[in-house]
Amino acid sequence: MPAGTTGVAPFFGTMQQDVLRQQLSQFGQEHLIRYWPDLRTDEQFALSRDLLAIDFRQIQQLFAAGEDHTNWSELAERALPPPAVRERTAEQNQHARALGQQTLAAGEVGVILTAGGQGTRLGFDQPKGLFPIGPLSGASLFQILFEKVVAARTRFNVAIPLYVMTSQATHHATEQYLQRNQFFGLPPEDVVIFQQGRMPAVDCSTGQVLLEDRHRVAFSPDGHGGLLEALVRSKAMADMQRRNLARLFYLQVDNPLTPVCDPELLGCHVAAGSEMTTLAIAKQSSRDKLGNIVNIDGRVQIIEYSELNPLADDIVERQDMHGQPVFWAGNTAIHIFEFAFLQRMTEVAEGLPFHIARKPVSSLNDAGILVAPKEPNALKFERFIFDLLPHAEHALVVEGKREAVFAPLKNASGEPFDSPESVRAQMTDFHRDWLRSAGVEISDETAVEISPRFAFDEDELRVRKDLPKRVTHETYLR
């Protein structure tokens, strides 16, 4: 209802304020409507909608439980290396590749891309998927990953639907960008864009839900573990079922080296009868900032690096009875799910644990002034998709080479592996290796980039008739 409307508006305002006060008072959250009389009618509607969508009992319970009290030391001491496919013979690789190609050609594979993050840590005020990362092309993360799906479709002459999960912060800008760029060659009917859920941030000391404006709750995305509920709520899961998809390739938007629809990885998954497969890389040290894939009590699960790193060296540096480091396997956030498994897990979506983190969150102080703290002042609640691993009847870990599959873009600078400069350098090195494997001469100083539409993989690159014998200057193959 627009501001200034008479009749029902004042009645709504008074009545709704009473209803909200009655509900909020049960949980000590009446402060959320302290500015109610000063709000326009449309702002009252917006605030009322947000407040009625919050499960305050759940928030109360999460705050009462406090930050994670899991005994990570005890879990880490029980952990064993995960069951993993590591060293493979050429024959095993060929068999896996053939199985993967078969499931792709049968139209049994869809792709899930999570893209809820902003480029804040990159100093980029847009959705991270719009960040220009192509070393020579300036192609965005979205363009590179979308074109990998296009390349797979072309290679196997089959429709591969792409499901893009955004957040409230990125949804509108993402939709506009993708529409403006005609989905980078994907048919619009094969791109399904949907939003993940939200959770309110709460004050660390009081548990009170924070306001980012007088009529707006300080929400944040509910984590990639919110995927299950979002798939059902958006009817994306019904779309998957209608298309008779057997498995879903899952990735996150920040890694341009993700081997989207890689036949070998898909083949390992199929051959093992896995319900959920995770692509891992060997950690360079036990303290790497990567989730740790382990086996605990016969179930594969992930211990976040933030939980492992505070522990003593004698726990973190442990080896198994064969002298293998327990914590060798780093999570790349690249997974393959059986559709039937995802469908079954929607029934336990509420059972996935919330991970609680202290973060600085801008919010109104008691004087109604927006304050941006430098130190953490709030608790945020997120679910993680990898917490599905222990639920899988059979979960598999497949090792990939870091330089070929993992170049996540995280920070503007300062980190050795996740800045724009380091990611672009790794992409260039990777594409040089592709060219050399195809017999092309190229020096280490020559910059090169290969569009996914030029070649889906090394095999496709090798058989191209238009490859130069030598590359002597910076070259973008597209």
Image: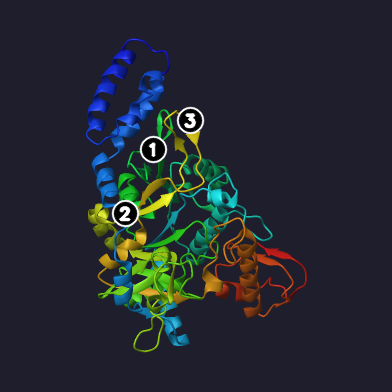
Q: Mark 2 or mark 1, which has the lower sequence index?
A: 1
Above or below, 10 against 127 in this view is: above
Residue 174 placed where, x, y %? 51, 44
Above or below, 104 against 116 in this view is: below
The answer to whether residue 102 shows anywhere in this view is no
Residue at which label 3 appears? 369
Residue placed furthest toward the top: 7
Front-lying residue, 5 or 211: 211
- For mark 1, give the secondary structure: loop
- For mark 3, give the secondary structure: loop
Residue at which label 1 appears? 210
Is 402 situated left or right of 80 in this image? right
Residue 148 placed where, x, y %? 53, 61
Is 338 situated left or right of 128 in this image? left
The answer to whether residue 74 shows anywhere in this view is yes
Residue 438 placed where, x, y %? 64, 78
Tag shown at residue 196: none
Give the residue drawn at x 35%, y 25%: 34
Q: Nearer the viewer, mark 2 or mark 3?
A: 3
- The kind of residue on which mark 2 rests is Phe
Label 3 and label 1: CA atoms lie apart by 12 Å
Give the residue drawn at x 65%, y 66%: 425
Give the residue drawn at x 52%, y 56%: 146
Residue 312 placed where, x, y %? 40, 73
Instruction: Residue 50: name its quadrant.
Output: top left
Residue at which label 2 appears? 354
